[in-house]
Amino acid sequence: MIRAGFLAIATLFFASSASAESLTAKQARAFVTGKLFSYSCFDGTTGVGRINNDGSAAGTIRILGKDPTRYVRLPVNTLYENGEQICASLKGLPFTPCFVLTKTSAHSFRGAVSGMGFMYCDFVRGGRPAPSKRSSAAN
């Protein structure tokens, strides 16, 4: 029974790995820009958002899956191409995070902080649009 479970998990892992495709910055921009994605992260954080062509983003976030859901907006040029990576300029962070983006299906991808693969979010196209009221903003 345990062996069968292990084989099933291994098969799913290798099948999903075989279909995974690393995205260059230009491919990521084409795949993501202007589309609504819901996301869930390694730490329980969830939300829905949209990244715009100008590097701004807007959507909802629920940190650690516990806090209240908040509306956030990131200003123009927050997300930008840096060579073959997408990076973010975020106030309050002591470093500039860049991301490894892996397409996991025709409608989904995983974004992980470069060099820290355990820090990731899974994104799936679709979800509820962000509410129009702005209860909180991130700069």
Image (cartoon, grey):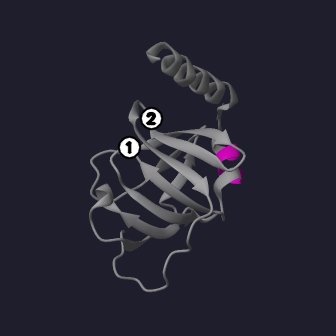
Instruction: Report the front residue among 30 and 117.
Output: 117
The mark closer to the camera, 2 or 1, is 1
Instruction: Give the class, few, some or many, for how many residues have Cα within 10 Å of label 1's Cα (few <14, many ≥20).
Output: few
Q: Which residue matches tag 1?
A: 42
Dividing the picture into quarters, in which one does residue 53 lie? bottom right
Question: Given the image, on which type of amino acid does mark 1 rest?
Answer: Phe
Kindly give the residue lying farthest to the front in the view shown.
Answer: 1
Instruction: Report the front residue among 124 and 59.
Output: 124
Question: Given the image, on which type of amino acid does mark 2 rest?
Answer: Ser
Q: Which residue matches tag 2?
A: 114
**Residue at x 41%, y 58% (from the top left corner):** 46
Residue 125 lies left or right of residue 132; in this view the side is right
Badge 1 element: loop
Instruction: Give the class, few, some or many, for how many residues have Cα within 10 Å of label 2's Cα (few <14, many ≥20).
Output: some
Q: Position of residue 138 (x, y in %)?
A: 36, 69
- Distance of label 2 from label 1 (alpha carbons): 15 Å
Secondary structure mostly seen in magenta is helix
Task: Look at the image and give the residue range highlighted in magenta.
Answer: 26-30
Q: Position of residue 31 (x, y in %)?
A: 69, 51
- The answer to whether the residues at label 2 and label 1 have Cβ atoms under 8 Å apart is no
Instruction: Using the image, determine if residue 113 lies above or below residue 4.
Output: below
Q: Is residue 120 magenta?
A: no
Kindly give the residue lying farthest to the bottom in the view shown.
Answer: 133
Instruction: Using the image, determine if residue 117 lies above or below residue 69.
Output: above
Does the image show residue 70?
yes
**Residue at x 40%, y 44% (from the top left corner):** 97
* Of callouts 2 and 1, the N-terminal one: 1
Q: Indicate which disc residue 80 carries.
A: none
**Residue at x 69%, y 30% (from the top left corner):** 19
**Residue at x 27%, y 57% (from the top left corner):** 92
Does the image show residue 76?
no
